[in-house]
Amino acid sequence: MTSNPDFEAKLARYADLLVRTGVNLPQGGKVRVNAPVEAASLARLVARAAYRAGAADVRVVYGDASLDLSLYEDGSDEAVDFLPEWVAEQSERLVADGYAFISLTGEDPTLLAGVDQGRVARRSKAMAAAMRNVSRATGGMEVNWTVAAMSTPAWARAVYPDLPEAEAVARLWDDIFAVCRADLPDPGAAWEGHLDRLERLTALLNERRFAALHLRSELGTDLTVGLADGHIWQGGAETAKTGVRGVPNLPTDEVFTAPHRERVDGVAVASKPLSVRGQLVEGIRVRFEVGRAVEISAEKGEDTLRRLIETDEGAARLGEIALVPASAPVAQRGTLFLNTLLDENAASHIALGRCYPTNVQNGENPEALIAAGGNDSLIHVDWMIGTPGTDVDGVREDGMREALMRGGEWVVG
Ligand code: ZN
Ligand code: ZN
């Protein structure tokens, strides 16, 4: 595969897309690349693309998910809970120094399936608490950041268990290139057109000032999601505080905003399995009352789902509502990628936990965020409820309705 010149050219174009469209690295900009060791070949191409774009500094840091497995299986309780302060401080310093972040994901989604979920939950909580300032800064777009996928053998095997490994890796690469429009002759130009469409939709939704959305699906979702006061719709490109316009997620087909944490009522039924903390949670059905999840069930992985929702008070409430058309490239592939970055573009979704401060006016002020109905939590976990039969209405303060989606497709914008 590595000797295939066509593949090498596509990979280089993809690396270039992450640097130019993803973080839109300016001349003299600095960038931190976080990558799993398996993604070294892509990380090197990203570094090269960044230097070609005029980067003043490129810092590549490799992670290794198998070290997490060692910790959970053989580490002491102290080790599971411990995270040195300098780890978060280093990231905070990079933000303060204006570094853009490119994070490559390609983890084995089943890696932690066999380990004690209580330990995983404790570690996740400790990590989220330690990285709280960094999450707030990146969530508030202090700097540009982008998350993108890398086909690794472990991930590809999980997505395509019936294929020989090399074929599975190649197939997953084809998927990634296709859904990121990186297989087109000029991916940058294709993204400009796509980002313009998303911008028209967010402009329209921001102009309407709906009080709530009402979603119904053939699977039984019948959910009213009240929106936060002064909510802001976002999607596609984001302009960071530095003035640079980039794309935080590659691919991205969603427009999203902040629900009001006390105004969500009805039933949400998942349309896809949820891959979380190394576990697959399937057949999720949650009933919300005055914003809170009051009935929770899943056909598989219910324990993991319950632990997640019990993380803290905000984990039982919503922090995101996102609309994605059934014609989005990820939805069209029809593959369950077992990775939120891709799977969240397969369907309209909601997220349990923290909202994005950028989805609420003056949301960077935590008090204003809470007063507007924004949600706070240590977690933010998306789950898919959209289907090709989903209808979405916007509901105004006076009860007037406007059709936004019919049969899973936009009927506005
Ligand atoms: Zn989302
Ligand atoms: Zn989300």
Image (cartoon, helix red, strand yellow):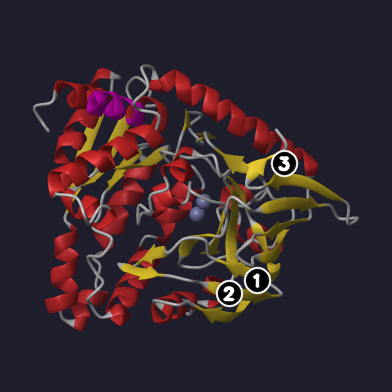
Instruction: Examine the rendered structure and indicate whether residue 370 appears above or below residue 12.
Output: below
Q: Nearer the viewer, residue 375 or 339?
A: 339
Question: In the rendering, at what x and y percent does residue 352 appear?
Answer: 53, 66
- Which residue occupies the extreme front position in the image? 162
Residue occupying the point 60% across, 29% down: 197
- Identify residue for label 1: 267
Q: Foreground mark, 2 or 3? A: 2
Q: Are marks 2 and 1 in contact (CB under 8 Å)?
A: yes
Q: Which callout, 2 or 3, points at the residue further toward the start of the chain? A: 3
Residue occupying the point 31% across, 57% down: 88
- Identify residue for label 2: 286
Instruction: Examine the rendered structure and indicate whether residue 316 appears above or below residue 328.
Output: below
The quadrant in which residue 372 appears is bottom right
Residue occupying the point 29% across, 23% down: 13
Mark 3: give few (<14), some (14-19) or many (20+) Cα within 10 Å.
many
Q: Amino acid at mark 3?
A: Leu
Q: Which callout, 2 or 1, points at the residue further toward the start of the chain? A: 1
Answer left or right for 17 relative to 401.
Answer: left
Per the rendered image, the range of residues in magenta is 10-18
Answer left or right for 133 relative to 350.
Answer: left
